[in-house]
Every structure is written in structure tokens, then in C-alpha cells.
């Protein structure tokens, strides 16, 4: 039998050998002189060995073959000055150990339009717009390759066929190392992307895939940029020494970023914008010149276990009406946290350690929620709130602040609970211009007073202890307003308008907010009782208000509040005033201090339920977030538990389950009112075990009587400058008596429609008259009532 050397020289096939073996040599008299000739002669599955040398040709692969450099990597060079060096449409071709040169700037060096091309141990160099392209139905599997392209990108995929780049080095690039566009699908693993003017990874369109265990450095644009609807996952990606941001996420698809790090970049560690909603876990940002994490452009996102160290800008910056959720976040050295521009960020367990300026700054009408905040060492105020911002801070520990523990200015109105300030250079709480509510807290160990209120400031202290502080403990400048309830100042109890002699405030200067609250609450109740009908509703709501009043008084006296749920079911037909009563109920709770704002957010099924998996929870969370501090009114709530008529999934149950969890998470900052027909609401309450325990009280709205409907029409008419004569009122009573009271009866809405129909008929009646008196223009007569309809 002939040996392998002879087989390589003759290029012939030996029957029965697997795989068939071909040889290519430019300098031999036997075998194939070009790689293309060998490919043309080889059957499917053949192995073609190429002897050392440079082969100037355009290689077209149309069948499954393996082409291997006989002398190992670097011994065989394939290149062409025109066209692509390699074009592959084969189902599964492979190049092993070849050096590939592309010379055409308008075409890729390697172009794969169908099937998968495997490149093992290859080196690819070109000056074209991309070195490697996978398009149409093609894909690449690159292992231990090196790609350089001073004229463009490294590897680009626009194909939905999965590809892989593994253990590769992609460097010396004019643009980006990896580009995923259209529906590109690529896994980039254990690779180095470096020395480029563009991105390390750029994804756009609907690209997917994964980047994992990669290192990206010395690139001119964000190391990883995900835009449009792209969604590659980023796992254990290390970014360092780049001229721009580490990660720039503006994709509309939720993407995962896990166990990644950014070190020494000139931009921000991570930028999230344009409504992006990533899931970021265990991100480490160190020495990013422009800051650690910046979220803007109405973005969301969940950030868990992130750590930001020694950054030149804010460790975390949130703006642009964004709503991110941060959990277990640490910011140390460098700068602290900035929350602005109407954002509503939530932080659960935030540690700010040894930062140079303020630890947490809130301004520009931001409304954050921070729980379990620790500030240990900062060069300025620990928490600074201004610019008409609000927000809630619970379980706050402040130690060694270079300024005040809390400073409020520029009309801000935050609330604080369970705060402890120790060894602050300024006051524990300093209210320069704005209002602060502080409860269940300790202000200690400062040479300044524990609390300072300037002329435009307002401070309410409930169950607060001020000890080991300078001066008299609390200082209120003339024009400032202070309320003390069940407090201790330097060991002396102070409550209500009884001010300790150690506090430099005259009793006349102490604000009496309780009277204002009583007056505002009474105004809301007067408006409630001024509504037509609803006698049972008025009685039930008044009882609820009185129960909340007593709960507040018990709390003020240090007694436990009675067990009670403020969530309600409003049962009844449409048009019976449920939304109006819900609005008044929220206003009363706000005046009593139960709710921060008391505003009403009205939603229906379409506002909570989406059409695909996962989106319903997002929509429900958005609705609840808007309602925080007020009332979420769910109209026709029973439709959430009603199953769909089709065979597809009904995501109403997902909305209910999400709602139950959020009601528990925000139990002190949210009231939910579920409204609907009485008979259907029982099914809604039984759809989740947690609903019945949270909605323990049902208020029933009875249909309006005919007399009440006539009164409503009269009120609407009076508001718009019309009059109802006695005979017109009698005609209306008969009209409403005759109306069928089925499920579609609109109650108050029917009254409004009746009034609108009457003024239309009046206009028609008077249209042909040459002269019309004021009385005729204002009087609505029985003939204006459509008794035929």
C-alpha cells in the first residue's frame, strides 16, 4: 500500500480510507497546484493538506471539506488582492492553521453566506470593512484564531444561524471587534478584543447571542454597546483601559449582565438609556473617570450586588425620569449617589463609604425610595435633598459625615424613618428651605444642634431622640416651623406644643399642623357628604376615616395602632361615584399623614396585562409605581381573574400575583381599591390566597334612585347655566322610572347622557326661531326629553 507521502504528492483518493486525502503543493510536480483545484476534485468529507507557501487565489467552498496547513499554523498563506479570499456556502467546511489575507477593501476577507465555516488556529488580516462576515444563513465557528483589520471591523454576523468565536484574539481595528447586526447570533467566549477605534462588541437590530469570559481593552468607544432590540447576554466580561464607557445599553430588549467588571475607563462604567431595562448582577466598576453607573432616558433595570469604587463622577447617577431598582449596592471612595430629573429610583441596602463629597444627593423633583442606607465617612452632607425633590428614606445609618446628616433645601419635601446620625460635622438634620418629616430616629454626637430649622424650613419630629448634641439640641430660627411629638431632647421629653426650655423656640412659633389636618380632612368629608345619594357609602367611608384618625392618635401617644387594612373593594354598577369617592378617600389619608400624596391612579385590565410572558409583571409594576404614595384604583378588577375564551394564555392571573406581592412590598405607601360588579368581585378575591386577606372591607355602591338621578341632572344643568322647571323634573322622574335597570345601566353616566340629549333637542327646538330670549335659552322643558328612546 502506498504511504501518506505518496498520497499527498499524487493527490489521489484511496478507496476505503476515511477521510479521503488530497494534497496541494505549489512547488511539487505532482498533486494539485491550487487549493481551489483540490476542492473542485474532492468529494464531500475530504481532507486536503496544503504544503507550505503562499497561494494567491479566491477560494470558493461549496462542499464539506477540511483544509489543513501541512506544516502547522503560519506555514500556509491564502490571499487575493481582489474579491474575498474565502467565500463559503458549504454545509460544514473547515480551515485549519491557515493565514488568510484579504486585499479588497470593499469585501470581507472571509465571507460565509451558507452553512458553517470552522476556522481553527487561523490568522486573518485585511484592510476591508470587516475581516469575517457571516450573512444570510451562514455562520462561523472560530477557535484560537487571530484577526487584525486596520481598515474596519473584526467579525460581523447578520445571520440568525448560531456561530461561535472561542479563544480568539481580535485586535488592531479601525472600528469594532465584534459586530452583531440585523438578526446576528454569535457566542463570543474566552476571547481578547483590543486595540480598536470602535467598540469591543457592538450589537444592533434584533441580534442575540452571548459574550462570556472575554477581556476587552484599549478601544476607542464603549467596550460593549447594545442598541435597538438586540439582546446578547454579557457574562464575566472584563473591561479595562478604554477611552469611553465600559457598557452602553440602550436596547429595548431586557438583557443580562452578570459578574462583569470595568476598570480604568475614561467614560462611565455603565450607561443605561433610551428606555433600556437590563438585569445587572455583580457588576464591579473601579476608577471610571466619568462615574460608575448612569441611568437615564426613562430607563428601568434591576441592579443587584453592584460595587463602585473610586470613580471620578457619581458612583450612581439616575435621571431622565428613570425607574431603576438597585439591590445591595456599594459605593466607596470617589463620589456618591446622585438622583435627579424626576427619577423614581429604588434602593434596597445601599452602602456609601468614604466618599469625597455628599454621599447621596437628590434634586430636580426626583422621588426615590431608599431602604437600609448606610453612610460611613463622606466629605459633605450625608444626604442632601433639594430642587423640590421628595422621596422616602427608611432605616438610615449615618456616621462621620463632613457636613449635616440630612440637609434639605430648595423646597424639597422628603420623609425619613428610623434614622440614626452619629458624629456629623453639621447638624443631624438641617432644614434650610423645605419640609421634612422624621420619625423613630436618633440624632447624636455632634457639636452642632441635633436639628436646625431655618426661616423657610418646616420640620416634624415624631418619636425622635436628640442627645449629646451642641447648643440646646434643637435650633429653630425665626420663621421656621417645628413640630415635636413624643421626642426627647438632651434627655428631656418634649411632645406636642410643649417645648423644652433647652429648645430655643417660643410656643407661639411652633406650628400647629394638627388643626390644619383636621380642617383639610373635614373639607374632604364635606365634599363627600355633598355627593348625591350614596348614604351607605358615606357612612362606611366616614367610619374608615375616623378609624384612621384614632390610629394616628394612638401612634402619637406611643400606643400600638389597631390592626387594619386600608385596601378596599368598591362593589357596584358603573356610574355610581366609585372613582370620585376613591379620590376623596386618598385626599383624606394624605391629610392624615397615612399617605404621602394621596393622588389617584386609575387603571383597567389593559393597563396591567400584556400579551406575552413577563411583560405583564412589568406593566403592573409601572402602574403601582405611579400610584406609590397614593391610591391605585382598578376599575372592573374582576376582569383580571376572568379566563380567556381562547386557548392561549391569560396573563390576568400574572397581574394579580404581581399586585399581591407589590401590595405587601409597599404596604405603608399604597392603598389599592378594586372596583367592579358585586357578584363578579367574589371571584376576583378568590383568585389569589393573598387577596382576601388584604381586601377585608367591601363598600357597596347602590344604584341611584330616579329621584337621585333627577338631582344629578339638575346639578349638571346648573353647572352649565341651564334650569329645570318643576314639570321638567316630574317628566325626568317618570323617564328614569321607565328605564330598564339592566347590567348596562349607567347610573350617573346615564344622567349625564340624558342632560346632553336634552340640550341637543332644545337646540333643535329653538333653531328656527328668529328671536330667542334668555329664559328660552336656559330653560329645559319636558319636550326636550326623548321619551321615545
Image: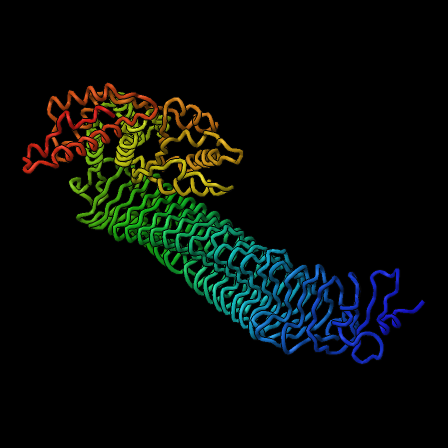
Residue 113, quarter of picture: bottom right
Where, quadrant-wise, is the C terminus in this rendering?
Answer: top left
Residue 131, quarter of picture: bottom right
Does residue 120 appear to the left or right of 494 in the view shown?
Answer: right
Q: Residue at x 19, y 41 (%)?
A: 510
Nearest the viewer among 784 and 126 is 784
Where, quadrant-wise, is the N terminus in this rendering?
Answer: bottom right
Q: Residue at x 87, y 70 (%)?
A: 7
Residue 436, quarter of picture: top left
Does residue 553 appear to the left or right of 358 in the view shown?
Answer: left
Looking at the picture, how far across and down is residue 473, in whole percent? 27, 46
Nearest the viewer among 618 and 373 is 618
Q: Residue at x 43, y 64 (%)?
A: 290
Residue 118 drawn above or below residue 441: below
Residue 524 drawn above or below residue 341: above
Looking at the picture, how far across and down is residue 384, in whole percent? 33, 53
**Would residue 536 be seen by someone viewing this image from the given angle?**
yes
Looking at the picture, how far across and down is residue 297, in whole percent? 39, 55
Amino acid at each position: 500500500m502506498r504511504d501518506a507521502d505518496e498520497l499527498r504528492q499524487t493527490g489521489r483518493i484511496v478507496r476505503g480510507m476515511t477521510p479521503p486525502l488530497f494534497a496541494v503543493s505549489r512547488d511539487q510536480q505532482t498533486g494539485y497546484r491550487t487549493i481551489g483545484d483540490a476542492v473542485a476534485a474532492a468529494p464531500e468529507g475530504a481532507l486536503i493538506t496544503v504544503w507550505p507557501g503562499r497561494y494567491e487565489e479566491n477560494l470558493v467552498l461549496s462542499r464539506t471539506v477540511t483544509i489543513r496547513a501541512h506544516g502547522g499554523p503560519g506555514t500556509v498563506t491564502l490571499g487575493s488582492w481582489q474579491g474575498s479570499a474565502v467565500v463559503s456556502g458549504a454545509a460544514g467546511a473547515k480551515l485549519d492553521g491557515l493565514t488568510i489575507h484579504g486585499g479588497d477593501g470593499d469585501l470581507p476577507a472571509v465571507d460565509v453566506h451558507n452553512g458553517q465555516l470552522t476556522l481553527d488556529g487561523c490568522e486573518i488580516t485585511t484592510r476591508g470593512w470587516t475581516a469575517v462576515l457571516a450573512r444570510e444563513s451562514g455562520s462561523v465557528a472560530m477557535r484560537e484564531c487571530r484577526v487584525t483589520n486596520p481598515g474596519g471591523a473584526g467579525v460581523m454576523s447578520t445571520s440568525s444561524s448560531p456561530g461561535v468565536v472561542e479563544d480568539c484574539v481580535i485586535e488592531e481595528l479601525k472600528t469594532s471587534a465584534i459586530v452583531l447586526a440585523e438578526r446576528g447570533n454569535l457566542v463570543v467566549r474566552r476571547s481578547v478584543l483590543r486595540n480598536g477605534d470602535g467598540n469591543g462588541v457592538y450589537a444592533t437590530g434584533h441580534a442575540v447571542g452571548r459574550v462570556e469570559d472575554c477581556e476587552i481593552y484599549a478601544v476607542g468607544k464603549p467596550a460593549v454597546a447594545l442598541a435597538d432590540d438586540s439582546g446578547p447576554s454579557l457574562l464575566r466580561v472584563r473591561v479595562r483601559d478604554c477611552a469611553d464607557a465600559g457598557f452602553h445599553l440602550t436596547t429595548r430588549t431586557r438583557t443580562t449582565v452578570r459578574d462583569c467588571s470595568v476598570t480604568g475607563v475614561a467614560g462611565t462604567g455603565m450607561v443605561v438609556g433610551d428606555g433600556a431595562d437590563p438585569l445587572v448582577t455583580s457588576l464591579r466598576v473601579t476608577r471610571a473617570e466619568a462615574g460608575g453607573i448612569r441611568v437615564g432616558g426613562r430607563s428601568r433595570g434591576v441592579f443587584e450586588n453592584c460595587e463602585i469604587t473610586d470613580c471620578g463622577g457619581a458612583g450612581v447617577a439616575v435621571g431622565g425620569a428613570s425607574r431603576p431598582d438597585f439591590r445591595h449596592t456599594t459605593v466607596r471612595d470617589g463620589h456618591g449617589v446622585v438622583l435627579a430629573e424626576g427619577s423614581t429610583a429604588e434602593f434596597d441596602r445601599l452602602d456609601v463609604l468614604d466618599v469625597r463629597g455628599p454621599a447621596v444627593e437628590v434634586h430636580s423633583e426626583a422621588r426615590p425610595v431608599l431602604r437600609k442606607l448606610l453612610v460611613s465617612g463622606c466629605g459633605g452632607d450625608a444626604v442632601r435633598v433639594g430642587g423640590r425633590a421628595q422621596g422616602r428614606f427608611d432605616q438610615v445609618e449615618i456616621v462621620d459625615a463632613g457636613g449635616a446628616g440630612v440637609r434639605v433645601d430648595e423646597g424639597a419635601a422628603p420623609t425619613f424613618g428610623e434614622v440614626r446620625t452619629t458624629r456629623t460635622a453639621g447638624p443631624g438634620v438641617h432644614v434650610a428651605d423645605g419640609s421634612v418629616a422624621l420619625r423613630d430616629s436618633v440624632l447624636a454626637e455632634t457639636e452642632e444642634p441635633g436639628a436646625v430649622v431655618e426661616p423657610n424650613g418646616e420640620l416634624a419630629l415624631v418619636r425622635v431622640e436628640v442627645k449629646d448634641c451642641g447648643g440646646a439640641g434643637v435650633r429653630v430660627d425665626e420663621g421656621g416651623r417645628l413640630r415635636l411629638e413624643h421626642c426627647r431632647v438632651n434627655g428631656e421629653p418634649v411632645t406636642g406644643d410643649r417645648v423644652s426650655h433647652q429648645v430655643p423656640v417660643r410656643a407661639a412659633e411652633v406650628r400647629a399642623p394638627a388643626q390644619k389636618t383636621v380642617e383639610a380632612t373635614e373639607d374632604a368629608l364635606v365634599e363627600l357628604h355633598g355627593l348625591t345619594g350614596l348614604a351607605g357609602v358615606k357612612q362606611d367611608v366616614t367610619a374608615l376615616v375616623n378609624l384612621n384618625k384614632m390610629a394616628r392618635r394612638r401612634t402619637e401617644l406611643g400606643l400600638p395602632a389597631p390592626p387594619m387594612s386600608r385596601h378596599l373593594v368598591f362593589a357596584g354598577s358603573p356610574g355610581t361615584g366609585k372613582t370620585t369617592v376613591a379620590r376623596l378617600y386618598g385626599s383624606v389619608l394624605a391629610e392624615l399623614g397615612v399617605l404621602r400624596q394621596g393622588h389617584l391612579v386609575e387603571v383597567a385590565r389593559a393597563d396591567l396585562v400584556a400579551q406575552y410572558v413577563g411583560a405583564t409583571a412589568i406593566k403592573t409594576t409601572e402602574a403601582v409605581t405611579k400610584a406609590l404614595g397614593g391610591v391605585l384604583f382598578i376599575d372592573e378588577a374582576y376582569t383580571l381573574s376572568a379566563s380567556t375564551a381562547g386557548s392561549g394564555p391569560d396573563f390576568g392571573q400574572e397581574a394579580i400575583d404581581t399586585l399581591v406581592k407589590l401590595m405587601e412590598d409597599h404596604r405603608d405607601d399604597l392603598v389599592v381599591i378594586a372596583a367592579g360588579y358585586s357578584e363578579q368581585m367574589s371571584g376576583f378575591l378568590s383568585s389569589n390566597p393573598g387577596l382576601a386577606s388584604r381586601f377585608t372591607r367591601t363598600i357597596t355602591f347602590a344604584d341611584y334612585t330616579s329621584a337621585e338621578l333627577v338631582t344629578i341632572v339638575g346639578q349638571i344643568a346648573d353647572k352649565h347655566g341651564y334650569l329645570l322647571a318643576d314639570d321638567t323634573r316630574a317628566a325626568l322622574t317618570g323617564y328614569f322610572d321607565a328605564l330598564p335597570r339592566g347590567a348596562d345601566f349607567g347610573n350617573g353616566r346615564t344622567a349625564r347622557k340624558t342632560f346632553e340629549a336634552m340640550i341637543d333637542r332644545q337646540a333643535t327646538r329653538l333653531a328656527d326661531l328668529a328671536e330667542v330670549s334668555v329664559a328660552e335659552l336656559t330653560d329645559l322643558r319636558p319636550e326636550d326629553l326623548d321619551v321615545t328612546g
